[in-house]
Image (spheres, grey):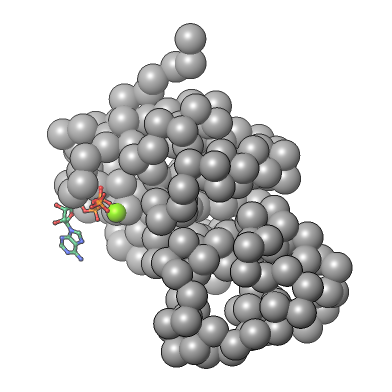
Amino acid sequence: MLQDASAVFERGHIYAVMGESGAGKSTIFNLLLKLWHTSQGEILIDDLSIDDWNTDTLRKSICCVAQEDFILNMSIRDNIVLDDASISDEEVNQAAQLACMQDFAIDEQINNTIGESGCTISGGQRQRIALARMFLSKASVILMDEPTAALDRKKTLCIMENIRKECSDKLVIIISHSDDVASYCDETYFLKHGKLQKSEKE
Ligand SMILES: Nc1ncnc2c1ncn2[C@@H]1O[C@H](COP(=O)(O)OP(=O)(O)OP(=O)(O)O)[C@@H](O)[C@H]1O
Ligand SMILES: [Mg+2]
């Protein structure tokens, strides 16, 4: 439960939100997506109360990467582009590279089907497909819930480097337990006892 939690998130910055399991980190995303509503306090987006935002408009401007994102029984390529036929092969390959997918989605491999819920690939590979979708997204706000939890350190650092490069004009909020992820963020908030505490970089 969030209580007296206060934070300002600005476009052009990357924020880490850290805290113990059950602290309420995912709850913040659920509130920002209007999946849940606040019982007290308020959330302002561009000075307008979230209650006054049209839900569809709000959600269209937000790209979400869940810890276990949905994977469909179709090719890696189709899982990345989903229903957007306007995305070129070159753009898909670039997104796959930014998501460090070279080990399983290079060249023709990208057309391989990956089974029901992606059962023929690893959890970390599924996570990188969700990250490739994010790199193609035109949304101005990116919310990621432990997006690298299943990845090794080298890939985590590589992806964070790419997020810094590619998302510099967006608002990016990353929930993570990883100090490596936080080290790439402009600011880190710790959520404890319902409150958000900012830890500034030295
Ligand atoms: N749908 C729900 N209904 C009621 N309580 C919930 C619901 N989902 C989560 N909670 C409670 O809200 C609190 C915060 O949950 P939340 O999922 O935000 O934690 P979290 O910080 O994201 O944890 P984790 O690191 O384990 O993902 C928890 O105590 C949890 O039991
Ligand atoms: Mg959570």
Kindly indicate the quadrant of the structure image that contains residue 2: top left
Residue at image position (46%, 33%) is 180
As drawn, is 178 to the left or to the right of 120?
left
Residue at image position (56%, 47%) is 155
Kindly indicate the quadrant of the structure image that contains residue 113: bottom right
Residue reaching furthest to the top = 202
Please determine whether, in this image, residue 170 is positioned above or below residue 200.
Answer: below
Please determine whether, in this image, residue 125 is positioned above or below residue 176.
Answer: below
Q: Quadrant of ligand 1?
A: bottom left
Residue at image position (54%, 42%) is 154
Kindly indicate the quadrant of the structure image that contains residue 92: bottom right
Q: Where's residue 122, x and y in %?
A: 45, 70
Q: Where's residue 170, x and y in %?
A: 66, 44
As drawn, is 106 to the left or to the right of 147?
right
Residue at image position (60%, 33%) is 13
Q: 151 or 59: nearer the eye?
A: 151
Q: How many marks?
A: 0
Please determine whether, in this image, residue 93 is positioned above or below residue 26.
Answer: below
Residue 135 can be seen in this image:
no
As drawn, is 126 to the left or to the right of 97?
left
Q: 177 or 105: nearer the eye?
A: 105
Residue 129 can be seen in this image:
yes
Q: Where's residue 38, x and y in %?
A: 28, 53
Q: Where's residue 45, x and y in %?
A: 52, 46
Residue reaching furthest to the front = 103
